[in-house]
Amino acid sequence: MYFVLSRIHIFADAGSEDTPATVAYDIPLEVVREAVVNAVVHRDYAAGGRVQVRLFPDRLEVRNPGTLPPGLTPAGLRKAHVSVPGNPLLAEPLYLTTYRERRGFGTCDMIERCRKSGLPEPEFRLADGFVVILRRGADGVGRTYIEAAILDALAGAGAGLTIAEIAARIGKDKNNIRRALNALVAGGKVLKVAAFPTDPDTRYKLAQYA
């Protein structure tokens, strides 16, 4: 897993007097961990082949030899389900040491974490084994998905919006929005309008409306 984390983008926010510094990867750490650990725990140990982790410019793919338990489909992973690990002896200690999320809810947690980070939901596929596809946090022009959503929200608000107003419009976590706004301000796409550095009524507007 650390091989993957060392090769994906990391975003850091220096924070302020009232806001602690935050650090995030372009794919949430917990989502990468769940995908990799699930591949090890749920793989078919009677089949040949190995767990494969492949990193591309736009996505991470985690593939394991095997299939889903009878009665469970890729669509079924998007809701609570019965967990049937391929290796129960390995699954239990990983769960107790918190390397695994809640039994039967790990994939649901992955979906929710990606949503909160402004990323597309994970894709679950059966194709020459079981594959999880995690989209990375950047679009074709180098902006994160959450940055693109912020720009869309600000496009219809000439007077600007506060972080709380942006969060209400795009349904994303305020800390992620704050980090994305810092990047947009630094890149000259968005202007920050505040009476003083820690002004709670700080508003953000597209640079074109300045």
Image (spheres, helix red, strand yellow):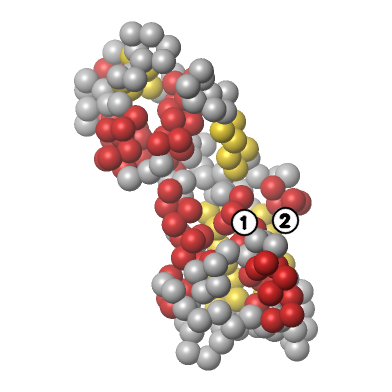
Secondary structure under tag 2 reads loop
Question: Which is more toward the observer, 49 or 86?
Answer: 86
Image quarter where the N terminus lies is bottom right
The residue furthest top is 195
- Disc sitting over residue 179 in the figure: none
Q: Nearer the viewer, residue 133 or 32?
A: 32
Is residue 58 at least partly visible in the picture? Answer: no
Q: Amino acid at mark 1?
A: Val
**Side of 87 relative to 21 (left or right):** right
- Image coordinates of residue 188 in percent, x first then y, are 44, 19
Q: Which mark is residue 1?
A: 2
> Residue 110: horizontal and vertical position, in percent?
51, 60
At which x and y percent is residue 127?
A: 58, 78
What's the residue at 27%, 40% (across, down)? 169
Which badge, 1 or 2, comes first in the chain's sequence? Answer: 2
Position of 208 compared to 90: left or right?
left
* Crowd tier of the residue under label 1, counting other residues whose Cα lies within 10 Å: few below 14, some 14–19, many 20 or above: many
Question: What residue lies at 33% left-to-right and 8% top-to-bottom?
Answer: 195
Q: Residue 70, how many percent across, how many down?
A: 53, 91
The reply to whether the C-beta atoms of the residues labelled 1 and 2 are less than 8 Å apart is: yes
Residue 145 visible at all: yes
Which image quarter holds the C terminus?
Answer: top left
